[in-house]
Image: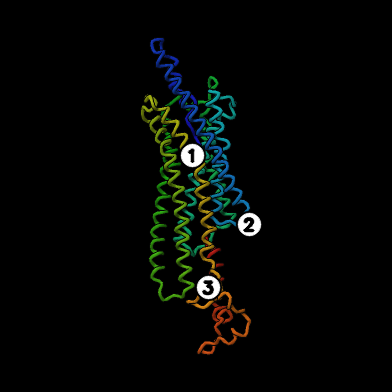
Amino acid sequence: MASFQVDNVNTSRNASQRMNSSNDTDSTNTKLSMELLTVIQITCYSVIIVIGTIGNLMLIINLALKRSRKTSQYFILNLAAVDLLTCTLSIPFDITLLVLGGWPFGRVMCRLVYPLQTVFMAVSVSTLLCMALERHRAILYPLQPKMTGTVIKLVIFLVWAISGGLVSPYAVALKMKDGECVENWPGNDPRYPEAFTLCVFLILYLSPLCVITAAYARVGVRLRANSLKAELLVGTSRDKNRLSKSRTRRNIRIVKFFVLAVVAFAVCLLPFQVMWMWSDFGNGQKWKHFNTLLTFANVMVYANSAVNPYIFGALGRRYSSCRCLHRPRKQTPRHFKRGTFPFCGFCTKTKKNSSVNRNLVSPAGSTSNRSTSPIEKGNRHREKQVNIQLESMV
């Protein structure tokens, strides 16, 4: 994800070096505050690297070991890969720059690192957009054929390709100057960086979030209608009624986790986007607390990569747990008569195939052991078919 350049981050530090001798005390205080801010930033980055790397690795391994993956799981796997690259590439680069205070990676890396960070941000929001559109298509148009694995992989490839194309002007504008990696737009015209910042805000933040909000709003309305419709299914069979209710509850649960991931993305990137807009279209860098606010904005951007795997990991646990809810419970045989003391009933319990069971005949002429009834066998068979349909649902 993109971050402010080193010269922007060190604006206050460079300004303090130009102070005269009458402001030595203020210069010392500014230096100490900047060092403390750097220590806090490095500490937060280190915690995010550990938590994010562990969470994303576990999520990737869990999804990669599956023989067959659902459509949404392909997008979750792509998002986890982006977050893992952010934790293992982007953040260590920023920590190195904070420690060394310069750009030691050369001209090629200058045009690669910062644009790559922006590409990661673009792929993240594009993946969330694809997940919202996929849920919208699956719930509002359930009779349409599902996307195949080849089509999903092609969509993911296009997401990466388009994200790289959008960031390419930024890569061209970067160059080395006095040992620093800085932007060099044509003619040093300030309208170019302003236009790029505005495009990043509109294309990679505001517009996708608006589309995602509209998609999930329509999905929510449809799920609400399906839920009310399932409550009114009185004349249908028990299996169809249970299948409809379970499908609606499952879709609601999945959409809730997806919406939570979108909210986390919007909240974590909002301060960062505001700082960019304020820096390019206002006088934000003249504010004395600008660097402090910028530091925590960068931390929140990277924190999103550590939050996502645990959101979707919780969704995976709910996937596993919801199967147990629909599994038919085995009723243990009662070995004592109702209303008697259990210990006495246990001492006088009978075996299944004993002669006593054969003598226990109901007035209608059927035996009391209902496990051998053809009706019960038919009900168990239908329950197994319903459970198979529930496990195969998206």
Q: What's the CA distance linking mark 2 and mark 3?
A: 49 Å
Q: Which mark is residue 67?
A: 2
* Residue at 42% from the left image edge and 19% from the top image edge: 29
* Residue at 49% from the left image edge and 48% from the top image edge: 311
Q: Is residue 196 visible?
A: no
Give residue 363's position: percent from left, percent from top. 50, 89
Q: Residues within 10 Å of mark 1 (few under 14, many from 20)?
A: many
Q: Secondary structure at mark 1?
A: helix
Mark 1 or 3, nearer chain start: 1
On screen, residue 202 versus residue 373, left or right, reads left
Q: Amino acid at mark 3?
A: Pro
**Residue nearer the viewer, 139 or 194:** 139
Q: Secondary structure at mark 3?
A: helix
Q: Amino acid at mark 1?
A: Ala
Q: What's the CA distance linking mark 1 and mark 3?
A: 58 Å
Cβ–Cβ under 8 Å for marks 2 and 3: no
Dot 1 corresponds to which residue?
303
Q: What's the CA distance linking mark 2 and mark 1?
A: 31 Å
Q: For residue 197, which quarter of the picture?
A: top left
Vertical order, 279 against 336 (above or below): above
* Residue at 55% from the left image edge and 63% from the top image edge: 391
Q: Nearer the viewer, mark 2 or mark 1?
A: 1
Q: Which mark is residue 342?
A: 3
Count of marks, rendered view: 3
